Amino acid sequence: MNIQTDNIQVSFGSKTILQDISLDLRDKEFVGIIGPNGSGKSTFLKCLYRVLQPNHGKIFFDGTEMSSLSHRDTALKMAVVAQHSTVNFDFSVLEMVLMGRSPYKGLLDRDQIDDYKIARHALAQVGLSDFESRSFNTLSGGEQQRVILARALAQRTECLVLDEPTNHLDIKYQLEL
C-alpha cells in the first residue's frame, strides 16, 4: 500500500487552506499529522478519503489516481474514523460495526456468518463485546468513538485513516489506541 499526494491545494472562496502538499506514504508506515487547530489537518485527510476534492493536485493509491477509483474500491482499501460521526438512526452497536462490511457486498446482499465473526472480533478489540445489542445513540461519546473504530477495523483494509481518533476517549482507551 502506497499513498502519494502531488501538490494538493484546497481553497474555500478566497481562503487557501492547503497549498502544495506532497507526501509519499509507504506500506506499514504510521504517520501523524500535527499542527494547531484550523491548520488544515482534517481538510487534508478529507481529501485522502474523498469527502473533499482538492482544487489542484492529485492523490494516488498504489499508483492509481484516487479519483479514477470507485468509492467502493476506495472503501475496500481504506477505512476511516472521522473527527465527527453523527448517526440519526437508532442502530444497535453490532449493526454499526457490520456497516464496515458493506464494501464487500452487493446492493441486496445480507450479512453472512463471517461478517458477524469479523464484527464481533472488532468489538472485542475495542473492549465492547458486551455492548452489541445496545443502541448506538445511548452510548457515551467515548463508547461511540470505540464503536466507530471497531467499524473501521471490521472493514479489514490495508489503510486506516484516523482523524483525532482519541476524541472523547478516557485516558485508558487513549493509551490502548
Image (cartoon, rainbow, N blue to C red):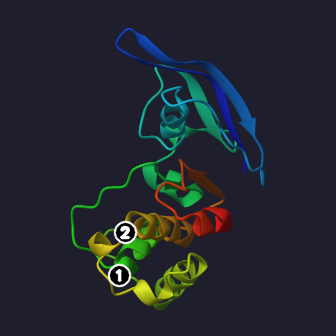
Per the image, the residue denoted by label 1 is 110
Q: Position of residue 7 (x, y in %)?
A: 63, 20
Q: Is residue 95 above or below residue 7?
A: below
Q: Amino acid at mark 1?
A: Arg
Q: Taking 80 as reference, is 6 left or right? A: right
Q: Taking 117 as reference, is 96 left or right? A: left
Q: Is residue 11 above or below residue 107?
A: above
Q: Position of residue 75 (x, y in %)?
A: 50, 56
Quadrant including the C terminus: bottom right
Q: Position of residue 78 (x, y in %)?
A: 57, 54
* Residue drawn where x is 39% and y is 63% of the image: 141
* Residue drawn where x is 61% and y is 31% of the image: 35
Q: From mark 1 to mark 2, how far is it between C-alphas?
A: 29 Å
Q: Residue furthest top?
A: 14
Classify mark 1: helix, strand or loop.
loop
- In front: label 1 or label 2: 2
Per the image, the residue denoted by label 2 is 140
**Counting residues from the N terminus, which is met first, the one under dot 1 or under dot 2?**
1
